[in-house]
Amino acid sequence: MVQRFNRPPHILSSYQVYLADGDSARFVRDIAMRYNVATLSRLTGSHDPSARRAAALALGILGDRRVIEPIGRLLADSDRAVRLIADDSLKAIWSRSTTPFGRTLLDSIVSKLASEDYEAAFEAAEKLVQTHPNLPEAFCQRALALYAMGETDAAIEDCQRAIDVNQFEYMAFVGLGQCFLESERPRKALEYFRQAISIYPDLEPVHLQIRKLEESLREII
C-alpha cells in the first residue's frame, strides 16, 4: 500500500521563503493570491506555531480592524515569536487606521510627554481623541498626560475608554494599575497588572511590579 503524506499548508512554505530572504512584499503577494482574510484568521488557531506566526504576519499587513480579535488572542500565545509578531501586527493595523494628521499628533504627544510638557501633550491628545474617537492609543496618550498632571481619576476614565475600544489594549490595563497604585489601592492595582500580563505576558516590568506588590501585601497580612 502506498502511504500518503499530507502536504503542509502553502502558507508554511511561503513563510519559510520569507524567513530566508526577508522579502515581505513577495510574501504578501504570495499569500494574498491563495488566502483571504477569513482563512488567515482561522489559521491563527492552527496547532502549528509556524502557521500561527505566518498568519499573524500576513494579517498584520493585509488585515484591518476586523481582525483585531483573532490577532489579539495571539498576544497570549504559548509561542513567544507568535506573541511578538501579533503585537507588531496589531500596531501596524491601528497605525493604518490613523490618518496622517493623527500620526503627526501622536508623534507630537510622545515628544511633549518626553520633554515633560504635560499641558501641551494633553492639548494635543484632546485633538487626537476628538478626531480619532475609535483609536485606543488616543485615550492612552491622554491618560498619560492626565496622570502626569496629577489627574488620576480622569486618567482612569481614559484607560477604561481605551479598553472599551480595544479589549486587548494591555497598556491601558498597565495604566489602570499605575493609577490605582498612585491612589494607594494596591490590591486593585495588582488586579489590573495581572490582567495586563494575561493579555500580553511579555511585560517584564509589570511582572516585577506584580512580585513587589505581592510581597508587600503579604507583609501587610
Image (tube, rainbow, N blue to C red):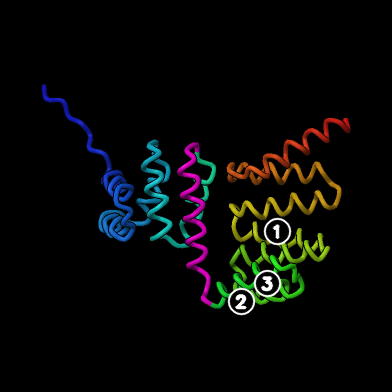
Q: Which residue is mark 1?
A: 159
Whole-angstrom CA distance, mark 3 to mark 1, is: 13 Å
Q: Which mark is residue 125?
A: 3
In the foreground, 137 or 66: 137
In the foreground, 14 or 5: 14
Please tell me whether residue 79 belongs to the stretch shown in magenta. yes
The residue that appears at 69% across and 71% down in the rendered structure is 112
Q: Earlier in the sequence, mark 2 or mark 3?
A: 3
Please tell me whether residue 28 belongs to the stretch shown in magenta. no
The residue that appears at 51% across and 66% down in the rendered structure is 95
Q: Could you tell me residue 203's position as x and y percent? A: 62, 45
174 left or right of 153 in image: left
116 left or right of 101 in image: right
Query: Magenta segment range?
Result: 78-100
Identify the secondary structure beneath mark 3: helix
Work out which quarter of the rendered image holds the N terminus and state it: top left
Relative vertical location of residue 18 with respect to residue 152 in this rendering, above or below: above
Q: Amino acid at mark 1?
A: Cys
Q: Image quadrant of residue 119?
A: bottom right
Q: Earlier in the sequence, mark 3 or mark 1?
A: 3
Q: Which mark is residue 131?
A: 2
